[in-house]
């Protein structure tokens, strides 16, 4: 199984993109056939072979298709179909990053998986903004996704460099307004600050901050903070064995009022109590690992 993650090198790209990542499961590889993808405030551009299928299911929606697609921020846990061999190359954007970019629709999109023609998408960006950016590498114009996926398998770092160059014409035209600027200031404060204190720290009313944040991300401050906390919690649990987990200690470490509060929280977000989760371990982080930067 191939599994890697790299940060952007370009300062321009790093303003919008958190990382590039790749997962490949081969026919003989073991793994849970239906891993669960936890709530995520970020959008991912997923590059995949045109004939490769995908299926995302939650309690209230199902998204099925083939090839490359957008995975937009979602507050629900998705079960994904990974029964067959597959390869996916991803671009993970910062929370709210798509708001400042040339996207249709312009408003934040949540709980959606949308098919994407990667070649047409990048060609359009290059035609609009290519004169202002570094030259895009000479890829196979008929299928950029196939060329990038081949690089992902053979030369991950070269794949990231190429993908970064392809992205720059689109990212170069990003524009900020007062809402995105305020949201960008709030995001680093969310993990360790009471939401009620954010307005004071950012010298604006709490109502103004909430409205701008929701406009840019589609999420409330509380929703985003909860997702960030879940990520940190799951990373911590990933490093511990089932018998090593003291749930009362975990509840205290991650700011829950008591152990029943943690139990309710996990049941609502991943559909399992702590005990059930510890036995099954069927989240993507458990199956594909807590990937560190390569």
Image: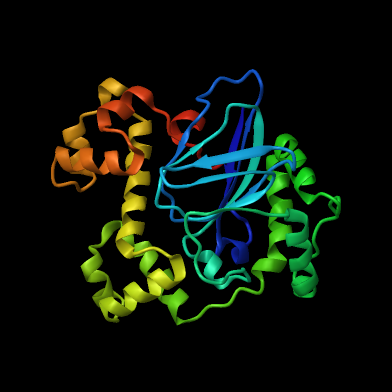
Give the image's coloring scheme: rainbow
Relative height, residue 286 to residue 193 (above, below): above
How far from the left and from the top, in percent, is residue 141? 86, 54
Say which of 232 and 284 sits in front: 284
Relative height, residue 226 to residue 258 (above, below): below
Q: Quadrant of residue 266?
A: top left
How far from the left and from the top, in percent, is residue 187? 38, 64
Of the 4 image quadrants, the one containing the N terminus is: top right
Relative height, residue 213 to residue 149 (above, below): below
Task: Determine whether, in the image, residue 163 is placed left or right of residue 109.
Answer: right
Total labels: the figure holds 0
Task: Determine whether, in the image, residue 15 is placed left or right of residue 214.
Answer: right
Of the 4 image quadrants, the one containing the C terminus is: top right
Residue at x-position 34% and y-position 45%? 230
How far from the left and from the top, in percent, is residue 167? 69, 60
Q: Quadrant of residue 234?
A: top left
Q: Quadrant of residue 202?
A: bottom left
Residue at x-position 81% and y-position 56%? 137
Task: Determine whether, in the image, residue 71 is placed left or right of residue 271.
Answer: right
How far from the left and from the top, in percent, is residue 280? 37, 24
Task: Determine whether, in the image, residue 293 is placed left or right of residue 136.
Answer: left
């Amino acid at each position: 199984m191939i599994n890697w993650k790299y940060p952007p090198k370009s300062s321009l790209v790093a303003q919008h993109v958190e990382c590039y990542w790749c997962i490949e499961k081969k026919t003989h590889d073991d793994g849970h056939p239906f891993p669960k993808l936890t709530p995520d405030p970020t959008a991912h551009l997923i590059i995949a072979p045109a004939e490769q299928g995908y299926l995302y299911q939650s309690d209230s929606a199902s998204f099925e298709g083939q090839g490359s697609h957008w995975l937009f921020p979602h507050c629900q846990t998705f079960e994904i179909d990974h029964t067959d061999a597959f390869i996916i190359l991803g671009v993970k954007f910062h929370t709210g990053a798509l708001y400042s970019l040339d996207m249709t629709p312009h408003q934040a999109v949540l709980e959606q998986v949308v098919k994407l023609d990667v070649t047409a998408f990048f060609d359009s960006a290059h035609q609009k903004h290519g004169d202002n950016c570094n030259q895009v590498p000479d890829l196979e114009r008929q299928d950029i996704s196939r060329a990038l996926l081949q690089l992902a398998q053979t030369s991950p770092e070269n794949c990231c460099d190429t993908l970064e160059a392809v992205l720059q014409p689109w990212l170069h035209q990003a524009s900020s307004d007062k809402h995105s600027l305020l949201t960008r200031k709030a995001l680093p404060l969310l993990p360790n600050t009471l939401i009620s204190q954010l307005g004071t720290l950012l010298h604006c009313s709490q109502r103004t901050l909430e409205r701008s944040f929701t406009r840019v991300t589609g999420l409330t401050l509380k929703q985003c903070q909860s997702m960030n906390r879940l990520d940190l919690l799951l990373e911590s649990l990933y490093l511990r064995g089932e018998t090593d987990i003291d749930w009362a200690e975990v509840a205290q470490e991650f700011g829950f009022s008591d152990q029943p509060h943690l139990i309710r929280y996990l049941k609502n977000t991943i559909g399992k109590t702590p005990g059930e989760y510890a036995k099954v371990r069927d989240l993507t982080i458990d199956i594909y690992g807590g990937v560190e930067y390569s």
